[in-house]
Image (tube, grey):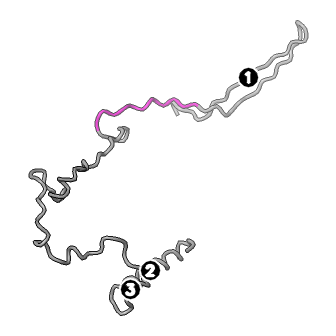
């Protein structure tokens, strides 16, 4: 190892002099001083591992109530162009306004003869068995 040693032995000497001719010296050795002769990390100017990552900014949020009620904000996926205007309510299908946008209904609220009931029952059974495998409490 040319430039690096993990631990270096350091000596410490204490001397006690009783008179001019005799002295008592005690030497201790410390093996726990960590040193390393590595060079400092180079700050990268381009892309790489040593480079700090820039924070990713999200899209701008529109807070204008007039624009939010007149346009479908965020629907345009192209760089060019604008968001499409909203049409009158009668030009959209009726099922669009009957969709449940809240939480899904609980198992007790569903009819036991419907396919939604059986689908929900299967999901809850899978969740239950996954929790048992992980050892988590209910």
Q: Say if the magenta span includes residue 115.
A: no
Quadrant of the image for the C terminus? bottom right
Label 1 SS: strand
For the stretch drawn in magenta, the main secondary structure is loop
Which badge, 2 or 3, comes first in the chain's sequence? 3
Give the image location of residue 93, x and y in percent. Answer: 14, 76
Residue at the (17%, 53%) spot, across then down: 67
Q: What residue would you read off at disc 2?
A: 124
What is the CA distance from the residue labelled 1 to the residue labelled 2? 70 Å
Which badge, 1 or 2, comes first in the chain's sequence? 1
What is the CA distance from the residue labelled 2 to the residue labelled 3? 14 Å
Q: Which mark is residue 12?
A: 1
Instruction: Find the magenta span and give its range.
Output: 35-46
The quadrant where residue 34 appears: top right
Q: Is residue 123 above or below residue 11?
A: below
Q: Which mark is residue 110?
A: 3
Label 2 SS: helix
């Amino acid at each position: 190892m040319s430039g690096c040693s993990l631990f270096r032995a350091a000596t410490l000497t204490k001397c006690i002099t009783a008179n001019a001719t005799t002295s008592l010296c005690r030497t201790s050795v410390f093996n726990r001083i960590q040193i390393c002769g590595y060079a400092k990390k180079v700050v990268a100017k381009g892309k790489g591992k040593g480079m700090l990552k820039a924070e990713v900014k999200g899209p701008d949020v529109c807070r204008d109530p007039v624009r939010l009620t007149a346009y479908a904000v965020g629907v345009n996926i192209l760089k060019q162009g604008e968001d499409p205007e909203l049409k009158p309510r009668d030009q959209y299908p009726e099922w669009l306004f009957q969709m449940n946008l809240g939480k899904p209904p609980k198992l007790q609220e569903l009819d036991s003869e419907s396919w939604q009931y059986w689908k929900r029952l299967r999901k809850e059974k899978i969740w239950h068995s996954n929790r048992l495998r992980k050892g988590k409490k209910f």
